[in-house]
Image: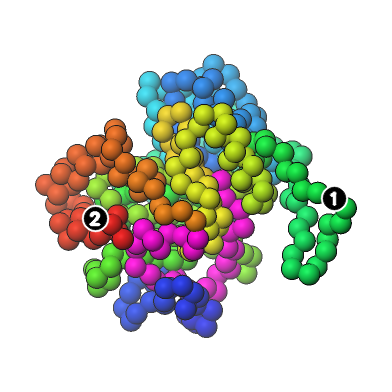
């Protein structure tokens, strides 16, 4: 495999050393095209819809037990929320290229292809990854027509005048979500789960992170994209990180530009919602980001201007540090890092004790020391 397109010397990134994980499977079962949607359960669908509209989603379907939220681009819903007794993330759905791929995956996994509900259309193969998370792979779903987009502003850049006699007045309104970008998941069985997604869904790694001083023990986080050949895909559609328990970390949704993101953030702040971290620009993926908490505590991200990679780029490698999460912006907050005192950090602390007592996961004392170093870096 050629490495002439490795993204070396960007900030602190380097390519792989001899014998390290190649970041892709040699013969994957299928190659998914994209992340189709994310599924959640919540007791209060009306409350979920209020936040969703403030965040910039549009409702595409709602009844007593189900809420579908979409962006402006044509396609499927970005988020599906079903009524449940408690708030929880129930899994991602990936888009297969065609029915033949779906049948191939079903045969490999030893499961059946089933029909999705009429309000979605199409077919699905449902599986469990090594962390126990339900993963759907779908095809043939109804396509929602595009909605009016939020038009990016015209900028005067340097000496180039593109806007004259016209002041800039971006309205303070919800940043209109265009599409689902990625989801980040934590797992105590990181390497096993990573290989499962690469081998079954044909995903490929854009960047690996490792705990400082522990590179020889292997990576502990990966940013993973779809393999569309020569067609560029998002730097990451899925990101996975090692941790003491399997859980949702955050999901990200594209908006038009920085002004839409910033003005939308002002709208959310005025509405009383909590900004977790932002505004800044990431290193891995390069996105301009802004993170918020919904009413149920789920972390969600507005992003714009993310990297797009084709299949020629090999993985970058870098140490995992809190300061290495952004090129510019405020320091990563305790809330974003999961160390702010509260229910979530207490649950994580309890899961650390549980994971250290078990031998069926990758989270040991050495990895715990590495994780604590990240939080203090």
Q: Residues within 10 Å of mark 2 (few under 14, many from 20)?
A: few
Q: Is residue 21 left or right of residue 352?
A: right
Question: Can you say whether 204 is above or below 130 in the image?
Answer: below
Colour scheme employed for the rendering of this structure: rainbow
**Residue sitting at the far top:** 64
First to last magenta residue range: 302-328
Q: Are dots 1 and 2 in contact, CB under 8 Å?
A: no
Q: Is residue 159 left or right of residue 221?
A: right
The residue tagged 1 is 166
**Residue sitting at the far left:** 357
Q: Which mark is residue 372?
A: 2
Question: Can you say whether 68 is above or below 7 in the image?
Answer: above
Nearest-to-viewer mark from 1 and 2: 1
Secondary structure of the residue carrying numbered label 2: helix
Magenta residue check for 310: yes
Q: Which mark is residue 180?
A: none
| Snapshot quadrant of residue 43 | top left
Magenta residue check for 169: no
Mark sitting earlier along the chain (1/2):
1
Q: Is residue 280 left or right of residue 211?
A: right
Judging depth in this view, the residue of 163 and 183 nearest the camera is: 163
Residue 96 position within the rendered picture, expressed as x and y whole percent measured from the top left: 56, 50
Residue 313 position within the rendered picture, expressed as x and y whole percent measured from the top left: 52, 73
Residue 191 position within the rendered picture, expressed as x and y whole percent measured from the top left: 30, 59
Judging depth in this view, the residue of 201 and 45 nearest the camera is: 45
Using the rendered image of the protein, determine whether residue 265 is visible from the camera's viewpoint: yes
Residue 336 position within the rendered picture, expressed as x and y whole percent measured from the top left: 39, 46
């Amino acid at each position: 495999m050629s490495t002439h397109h490795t993204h070396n010397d960007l900030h602190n990134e380097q390519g792989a050393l001899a014998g390290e994980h190649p970041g892709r499977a040699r013969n994957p079962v299928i190659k998914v095209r994209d992340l189709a949607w994310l599924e959640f359960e919540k007791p209060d669908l009306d409350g979920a819809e209020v936040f969703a509209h403030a965040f910039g989603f549009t409702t595409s379907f709602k009844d007593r037990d189900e809420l579908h939220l979409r962006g402006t681009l044509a396609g499927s819903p970005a988020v599906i929320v079903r009524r449940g007794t408690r708030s929880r993330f129930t899994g991602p759905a990936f888009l297969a290229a065609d029915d033949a791929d779906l049948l191939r995956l079903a045969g490999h996994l030893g499961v059946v292809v089933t029909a999705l509900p009429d309000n979605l259309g199409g077919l699905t193969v449902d599986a469990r990854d090594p962390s126990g998370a339900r993963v759907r792979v779908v095809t043939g779903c109804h396509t929602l027509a595009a909605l009016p987009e939020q038009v990016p502003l015209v900028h005067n850049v340097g000496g180039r005048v593109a806007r004259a006699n016209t002041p800039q007045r971006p309205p303070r309104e919800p940043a209109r979500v265009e599409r689902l970008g990625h989801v980040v998941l934590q797992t105590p069985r990181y390497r096993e789960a990573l290989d499962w997604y690469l081998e079954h869904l044909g995903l490929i790694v854009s960047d690996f992170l490792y705990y400082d001083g522990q590179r020889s023990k292997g990576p502990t986080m990966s940013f993973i994209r779809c393999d569309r050949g020569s067609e560029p895909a998002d730097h990451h559609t899925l990101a996975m990180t090692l941790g003491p328990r399997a859980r949702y970390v955050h999901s990200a949704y594209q908006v038009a530009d920085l002004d839409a993101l910033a003005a939308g953030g002002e709208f959310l702040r005025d509405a009383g919602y909590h900004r977790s971290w932002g505004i800044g620009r990431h290193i891995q993926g390069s996105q301009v980001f802004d993170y918020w908490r919904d009413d149920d505590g789920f972390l969600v991200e507005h992003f714009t201007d993310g990297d797009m990679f084709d299949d020629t780029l090999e993985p970058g490698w870098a140490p995992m540090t809190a300061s290495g999460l952004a090129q510019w912006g405020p320091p990563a907050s305790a809330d974003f890092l999961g160390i702010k005192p509260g229910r979530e950090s207490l649950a994580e602390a309890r899961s650390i004790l549980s994971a250290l007592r078990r031998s069926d996961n990758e989270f040991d004392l050495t990895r715990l020391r590495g994780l604590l170093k990240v939080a203090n870096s």
